[in-house]
Structure formats: C-alpha cells, structure tokens
Image (tube, helix red, strand yellow):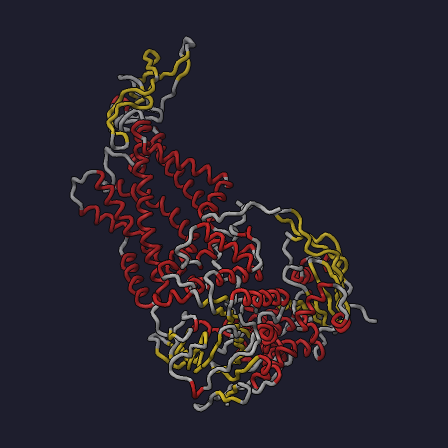
Amino acid sequence: MSEPLLSIHDLTISLQEEGGERILLKRFNLKVDPFKIVALVGLSGSGKTTVALSVLRLLSEVFEIEEGQILFQKANLLSLGPQEMRRLRGKAMGMVFQEPLNAFNPVFPVGFQIGEVLRVHTSLSYQKIRTRIIQLLEMVGIPDPPRVMQSFPHQLSGGLRQRAMIAQAIAAGPSLIIADEPTSNLDVTLQAHIMDLFRHLKETLKISILLITHDLGVVSHLADEVAVLSEGEIIESGPTSEILSHPRHPFTRELLGTFLE
Amino acid sequence: MRGVGEKLPDPPHPEERSDEGSPLMLLEIKNIKKYFPIQRGFFHKRQGLVKAVDGVDLQIAAGENLGLVGESGCGKTTLGRIILRLLAPTAGEIFFEGREITRLPQRAMRPLRKDLQMVFQDPFSSLDPRFSVARIIQEAMTFDLGKTRQQKLDRIRHLLSAVRLPANILNRFPHEFSGGERQRIALARALAMNPKLLILDEAVSSLDVLIQAQLVDLLLELQKKLALTYLFISHNLRVVKKIASRIAVMYQGKIVEWASAQEIFAQPLHPYTKMLLAAAMEYKAVKPFPLMDFSEHSHLVDRGHDHWVMS
Amino acid sequence: MIKAQEKPLSQFTLALRRVRKNRMAVGCGVVLFLLYTTAIFADFLSPYSFKNEDRSYSFCPPMKIEILDDNRKPGLFVYGYYFQFDEFHKRIYEIDKEKKYPLKFFVQGDSYKLLGLWKCHRHLFGVEAPGRIHLWGADSRGRDLFSRILYGGRISLSIGVVAILISFSIGLWVGGIAGYYGGRIDNFLMRVCEMVMIVPGFYLMLALRAAFPENLSSLEVYLWLVLIFSFIGWASLARIIRGMSISLKEREYVLAAKSLGLSDFAIIIKHILPHTLSYSIIAVMLSIPGYILGESALSLLGLGIQDPYASWGNLLSEAMGILQIQFAPWILLPGFFIFLTVICFNVVGDALRDCLDPMFKEGKL
C-alpha cells in the first residue's frame, strides 16, 4: 500500500460573518493516492472550493483554519512558510479553475502566461521554454499550437481556453492537479473531451487529480474514488463503483437520482 | 390541458403548408435566416458573413415542448432572440397563433409580449442588481393597468409561491440569492403576464445538477397548472430528455434532425445527433465534428414516424 | 411563525434607511442643512446688511462677547473699541471699557425683505448705535464679516448646486442616449461634446462675461454665471456616461427589459442611468468646489459678483495681500466655509453613492 499523495485530516475552517461564526468545513478528511482521480462531489456552497483553495493555501486571512492537517508528500502544508508554499505551487501542485476567462490575465497572450510557470520554476532558456509550451499545448490536444500561443484568452473558444489552462497547470510537472469544476461551463461535447484529457493525464503522465464537481455523471466516468460533501462535512466516501451502486446517505441517493434518470 | 408526451395531431406535411401560418400551431417559423456581416477596417468594409441562422423551419404546437439542442455557436440562442423579436431576422417569417409577427413595429409587438417570454441563461446578469425582487416582478406587469396596488402585490406574492420562493423576499436584492433562486425569480418575472410560450435559453445550464432537476420539476408542474408551452434551448440532451416532447437538433445554423423525444433517443439518425447523444449520455468524446458543407438542396426529409433528418 | 406580510418599499426608502446608519454622513448632512438655512435667512440672522460700513472700524478684530463686567455684574455686552496708529500707520485696536453696549435680541436694524417677500427690520441680535458688534471682525471698509459671510453663502452655496443640476441633467441624458443608440446619433452627439470641450472654459467665461453690458443687476450676473458654468460642464460628464452606457446596454437585464416590452426611454431611465450613478454622484460632488472656486476666480478679475455684493469667493479676494493676512487673519474665514462645504458634500456624496448600491455592506464605512 503506497503512501497517499495528499492527505487531509480533520480540517476545520470557519468564517466570521455578520450573524456570527459560520463553519465552512467540519473535520474534513480526504486522501488522494498517487496516480488516482478522486472526486469531491457537492453543491455550490458546500465548501468544495474552500477545500481546493486551502490545499494550495490560497485562502484569504478572513478564513480561520481552526484545526487539522494537510499532508502533501509527508509535509504538513499548513505549517509551511510562504516561501516554501510558493515553491510547491505550480511545481508540485497545479490548479485548474472553473472559468478560464477569469483565471487568465486578459492582457497577456496565453503562451506568455503558460511560460510564466516555467520561468518561475525552472531555469530553462527562452528557446527551451518556447519548445516546451508547444509540447504542452500539443499534449492537451490543442491544434495549431503556435497560433494559440500568441492568442489572447478572449480570442480562444471555451474549450481551447480550458485546455490551455490545463496546459498551464501541468507545465512544471506537478504530481497533483486540483480541478475546480473544470467542465461546468462547457458544452457536453467539450466536457467529454476534457474528461478524456484528464484520463490521459492520469494514465500517461501519471498525474493524480482531485476533481471537484457537482455532476455525478462526470464522477462515474472519470473518478476512481469519490467523496460526497454536504454542508462542510464528508457524508460518504469510497471507490466510485461502490458508492454509485450502494449509496447509503439520502443526499447521495438524491444526487444519484438526477444522474440515473 | 394536455399533458406532456400525449399524442398530438400530426403537423401539416411540408407540401400541404400554405403561405399562411397554420392556426393549429402556437409558434411557427419559416426559413428564418440571420446573417451578421463581418466588418473590418477603418471604413467598416464588409468582408464576409457569419451565418448564425441559416434557413430554419420550426413548429411548436400548444402544450408540446420543443427542445432545441446544439453546441455553443450553433445559433440556437440567436434563434431564441429572433423569435422574441429582440433581433430582426435577415429573412424568413415568424407566425404566432397563426398571425405573422415578423415585421410588426415594436409598438404593435407590445401587447404580444405578454404571450411570449424568456428566461435567460445567466442568473447573475439577467436581473438588474439595483432592483429589489418586488420591483423586478412589478416591472413585468406593465399591462396590468387596471389593477390596484393591492392586487398587484397579491399577484407578486402568488407568483413567488408558484415558483416555490418565500413571500418575505420582496425587499431583497438579487445578489442575496443563489443561482437557482435567481432563476426562479426570473421565472416569476416571466410568468407575471401569463405567457403562452416560454423560451428557456440555457436556463439551467449554469446550475448544479440537483438544482437543475428541481427547476425542471418546477417547470413541468407549472406547465400543467398554467397551460404553458416551452421552447427549451440547451446543449445538454440529458436535461432536455426530461422536459421535451419533440427535439430539434441544430448545427451550424441549420436544423439537422427533428423528431419526437423518444425517437431521438431511441433512434438518432443524423451523425451529429449521434455524437451529441454519446457525449451527453455516455460522456464519450468523439473527434471534433467536421464542418459540414450543406448544399443548396439540403433539406429535411421525413424518414417515417414524423422523424425529419437533413439529407 | 409567519411574519407580518411585507410590503415592497421604494428604492429611496431603502436607501434612506441605510443612510441613517452612517453617522458621519448624517452629521455632514446636518451641517449642510444648517449652512443652507443660514444662507436663506441670512438677513435675519446677521446684525448688519452686507453693505453696512463704518470706516472707523476698519479691520477691527473679532470682538468678544463679555458676560461679566468689571463689577462682576452679569449681562451680555460688548465693549467699544478705539484705535491708535502705530509707527507703520497701521491701526491697533484697544478696548474702551468706558463704552459698554449691551447685546440685544430681535433688534431693529437695516431693513430687508425676508425671503424676498416681506419687509422687515428685525435682526436676531445686535447692539445699538454707535456701538458695533463684529463677532468675526471687519473688513477694510468696516463691514461686518459675520454678516457678509452669511450673505456670501447665498451666492456660493447656490451657484454650485444650480449649475450642477443643469449640467448634470444635460450630461446624463446626452451620454445615456448616445451610448444606448450608437451609430449616427452617438457620432453626432459626441462631436457636439467635443466642440464644447475644445473651448477653453475659463476664457469662454471671461469672454462671455465681458460681452455683457456693464450695468447688469447682480441677479442677472448671477444667472448668467450659472448658465455659463452649466454650458461648459456637461460635456465631459456626457462622454463618460456614454462610455458606461455602451457597456451597460449589453447587459442581460437590459435584454430582459426589452423582452418585457419596455420602451427605450424607460430602459435608459430605469436600467442604464441608475448604474452610472456611482460615478455620477462622485463627479457631481467633486465639481461643486470647482464651481465655487470658479466663481471666486471670476470675482477676483472683477467679472463675477461685484462689490458690494458678497460671495465667499470675492470675500477671499480681499485677502490677497500678505499684509492683510498677517495683520487681519480673520479675513480668511470665508475660506474655512468653502472648505467645510466641500468636505460635507464629499462625505454626503460618498454615503449616497454607497447607500444607493444594494450590494454595499453596511458594516464597512
């Protein structure tokens, strides 16, 4: 049994609001094994994005991490300093956001932004970076990489943008990708392609993926394991086939209901 | 009131259709085209055309929900807006309840607006953030000129309960609600004038699956109570399956397949439809569909059981 | 438990409720209210008319209201002043304890027309002749600064507001229509804006003002000034509103309003222009000091409100010399009032903008 790549223990995060304290995550436990796709399923507001941001330590200070550990390759991410975290971000862990239009800077070409990851984490020469970018774009299935490299985010279609964002996430060779609702804004046809791409990332590039979604259909076709999140707590988790064939919690059954209809 | 899925009389055969709109149909559109010129350069020289909608015929009978499916960019949203007369078509005719409305001046359109309403895709931008919920719905009641203030208030409360929202939200603002709740407010607004045809333009696409399911249930319930007909525009056949009795598949501005929902799911005939189905139901990725070159003579052919496919 | 049925409130009621919570804004609003009220009732509140002069009190320093006299007898009064010349031929004032002038209320004084309608003689307070009361000192001609500041408020406080209302209305409409319709209408309106903006404002003011006949009554001068200011001010606001209007008309709620059958006019008023408010209000509030100072610049050059009429601007023009400032610093008091007005307008404007925005969180100030 190998060590899990990412392992979250008893994570509790709260937020001070006008009406008092609101608990976003309550004793949250999750693990991602190497070369596996783990899905975190929940509705908007259940705390899924909070999980993603807390692993990368991108939460703003208003969120209080009351207790818990996030172990990544044996180090507790919560105890690392900003310098160390920065080294990990991009290089060991990558993130794919839901809306590429927002995640990309509109005033820089896409190639330049992908290159930024390489510039920060590697010491490759300009030429080598350029080659690598083209390589990455091809890897994610983008046709005509040189043209796309020079394009601005708004000039690309939704599917191409999302692929470019995935290229940026895997650029420095991370072992874990966190994907926050990567296909929610895409057409079904594009969704299928991106799911294929994730499968390819897992099998060929050996990257583990923590997939955050609200769609059990995506989960059933992509994830090895699934954890169901409702109002900050994990209510059920296990191998996908298990959970989908024998859901125990009523919420899981409800979600499954919409999928099976 | 007819329920969804009940057998309806066959729509008129193409050769039998006269130049007048058929009175049986709630909505009928003939050969609608919408071309956008591509203008470049300082002098706005026309350099080409984007054929957003390229010769579309559709018929919707009262009580028979039509699902209009296709990917982004196929022209379905443009078509929805043309039907609502928010965009002027380059060519073609629109018939509502047998009467042609294509070139009606906006003034004459106004009384018809209460019959034709739309719920838009983005719940975050289709409601004016500076308007309170009460004001949003009130704005839609422009034709209730005879009603007193109290009657209007009662109607607003009635609408809110119809969409399963609590009545005490009158003074709240859109940003205080979730996506699903906002769509319900938008729905209440659309229902304010008792429309006959409601166009839902990707209305559930940006919501969680569970909320999507709830909203679709709500729509079906409201249809029975209020004698509505839906034109449901979406890219996701999975969602359309629950609500449509007939489905039209759109690609590159044209309808490539048109049949009852059962037929489309059981026996898709056009390759594009097959691809959409595979992607939606089985999450299967197919090689990008080649740009089809439609010849002048491409038209819909009935392959039996009123199942029309582009030749 | 079902709450009592809620009634929908208008926008303004909702906004007002919010404003009340912002103490600073309420405070500044009260100050502005007081300033405007005193301006309206200036003739009653001030002991003298703005013209009333007494050269023997030239540059008299601010007087103190005494409560107890040497014999410790209570009663409000003012001492008489007399002056001597020092080696620079400057006056130095000394208190003459021999002359006591009791402070009286509702005294008879210079006549005036209350609110322009009723002839009156009464003033709130004053002293009997030959005594004079100068709470805030006097100017070179011995005119009471307190009175003149109150009268001056009338011009300065109103000129900005009236001019702003006119230019704001024109600018909002021109910008809103140009942006919404686009095409030729937009083209035409923007070219008109540009032509207006090309003209250097200040020179236009001078030229227009100089073109008037010499002997205009001060009311006419005032009206012309307002017109000139409005004429210059609307164009830049229009351009910015037009830009905002162009992006706002693409919003989906505008499309939704169209689908409800609203006319263009209604859409512009209800959906587009309110969204430009957050910019417009600030722009308006920040222009008011500009107008106040513009008026004083004109007065400085002798083209604005003329002596003997007072405006804060032209009162300040008296304070142009270093000698005056050094030896009679109370001359600068009108400047403090300009400052106070500007600050209050800014705070109230900020609060208004925030309160009209439904998404503003009340906790933050």
Res C70 quadrant in image: top left
Nearer-the-camera pick, B54 or B259: B259
Seen in the picture, residue B138 relative to B268 is either above or below; the reply is above
Q: Is residue C145 left or right of residue B228?
A: left
Indicate the quadrant where residue C181 lies.
bottom left
Return the x and y of residue B221 as percentages of the image width and height: 58, 66
The location of residue A152, given as percent across then percent down, is 51, 72
Instruction: Kindly give the residue lying farthest to the right in the view shown.
Output: A1
Q: Quadrant of residue A239?
A: bottom right
Give the x, y percent position of residue C199.
Answer: 26, 55
Task: Classify C70 as above or below C321.
Answer: above
Q: Is residue A189 visible?
A: yes
The percent coordinates of residue A24 (x first, y second) are 68, 55
Quick one: C23 or B206, which is closer to the camera?
Answer: B206
Count of numbered badges drawn on the protein = 0
> Is any atom of residue A83 visible in this view?
no
Q: Residue at x 69, y 58 (%)?
A: A231
Taking depth in this image into account, of C291 and B220 the one nearest to the observer is B220
The answer to whether C43 is drawn above or below residue C240 in the figure is above
The extreme top residue here reads C71
Which is nearer the eye, B64 or C280?
B64
